[in-house]
Amino acid sequence: MRDGAVMVTGGAGYIGSHAVLALLDAGWRVVVVDNLVTGFDWAVDRRARLVVANVADDEKVRDAIREHGVTAIMHFAGSVVVPESVSDPLKYYRNNTAASRSLIESAVSEGVKHFIFSSTAATYGVPEVVPVREDSPQLPINPYGMSKLMTEHMLRDVAAAHPLNFAALRYFNVAGADPQGRSGQSTAGATHLIKIAAEAATGKRGHVSVFGTDFATRDGTGVRDYIHVSDLAAAHVDALDLLLAEPGKSHFLNAGYGRGYSVLEVLDAVDRVTNMKIERRMEGRRAGDPDELVSDNRAILEALPWRPKYDDLDRIVTDALSWERHLASRQ
Ligand code: UFG
């Protein structure tokens, strides 16, 4: 067992619940703070403690930090739907930016010295150069990306003023599910391609829409860098070790595999894995979709001992499908 405990906000959600598993498996004590608005209490591993609270509820958060001896915070809680951020930007500036501000202040006032933040490739907007490096211009094209970028800036300023270091991991397209079947993406109203394709494969929907066939890519459909959620979770555990080892240093790191797949290539993988032919409907572009978003991941590979274990599209799809079937059997 490691010294101290890790507070995981959003630990009842998709990526957070996988981080909880990775931390527990690595011997950490874990306390989850989640308001259960989009998360599920059953998604929190029983070995962790669950505090049902908003991360901006200073009293509950600070009590939990003291009671459990929290020495580091992993902050996943927030709102994540890009189109919703366009129609309701203030929700994103409240749930992502303002809530993060409160949480960071709680960390500083309670003497928590390490902070890992769930940032996003959406902070880059439409990158001019792909693969995208961490020092590329950050020009978000939606309030979601801006709300996360503002939190990156707060962390940078706070780390310069207080004894706290941080790692902001900029996620590319997170997909898949725990290979042991303990968690997966469960929130209703999915918009993410692999989740939608898995729903189609299990009969929850009749077809998959392909949004745009005229992008400047090899087959005209959008190219993304899909990363398995359990690899991403493992990167957080290694990032925490790095923060502990080098207290004066903070990091902005892309979290991706550095390789892109088109929408059609993803759907081919789903057909291959399921031995089905899922109906594809070619449709117009969604607003704001870049042609290609692929990480340059040299920095994370250099900074961390982390090496992806599931860097394989068929594996990602297989695990997403297993979880989808599990969800279907629960209903
Ligand atoms: N797509 C389809 N059909 C669908 C869903 C998606 O063709 O039903 C396409 C999209 O147009 C895109 C690709 O599949 O080309 C991936 O789309 P997702 O919605 O799965 O993911 P995004 O790349 O749009 O979004 C991801 C993260 C966001 C983040 C964004 C930008 O999920 O949180 O990258 O970094 F903001």
Image (spheres, rainbow, N blue to C red):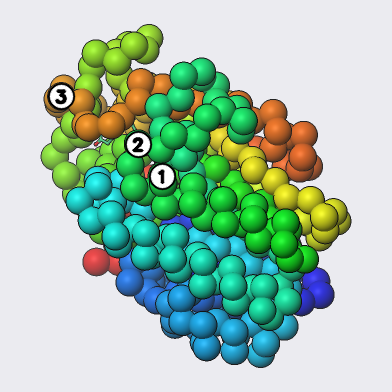
Q: Circle 1 is placed at which residue position?
A: 145
Q: Looking at the picture, does residue 295 appear above or below residue 218? A: below
Q: Circle 2 is placed at which residue position?
A: 141
Residue 284 place in picture, x, y as percent: 15, 24
Q: Circle 3 is placed at which residue position?
A: 284
- Which quadrant, please, contains the N terminus? bottom right
Amino acid under label 3?
Gly
Front-lying residue, 259 or 60: 60
Is any part of residue 317 visible from this angle?
no
Is any part of residue 279 visible from this angle?
yes
Instruction: Tell which tag, 3 or 1, sits nearer the viewer.
Output: 1
Amino acid under label 1?
Gly
Residue at image coords 57%, 57% = 154
Quarter, ligand 1 = top left
Residue at image coords 37%, 74% = 36
Extreme residue toward the right, this view: 245
- Whether residues under marks 1 and 2 lie with C-beta atoms below 8 angstroms apart, the answer is yes
Residue 51 place in picture, x, y as percent: 50, 83
CA separation in Å, label 3 and label 1: 23 Å
Q: On the image, which quarter does residue 311 sit in? A: top right
Residue 187 place in picture, x, y as percent: 32, 60
- Which of the labelled discs sits on residue 324, or is there none? none
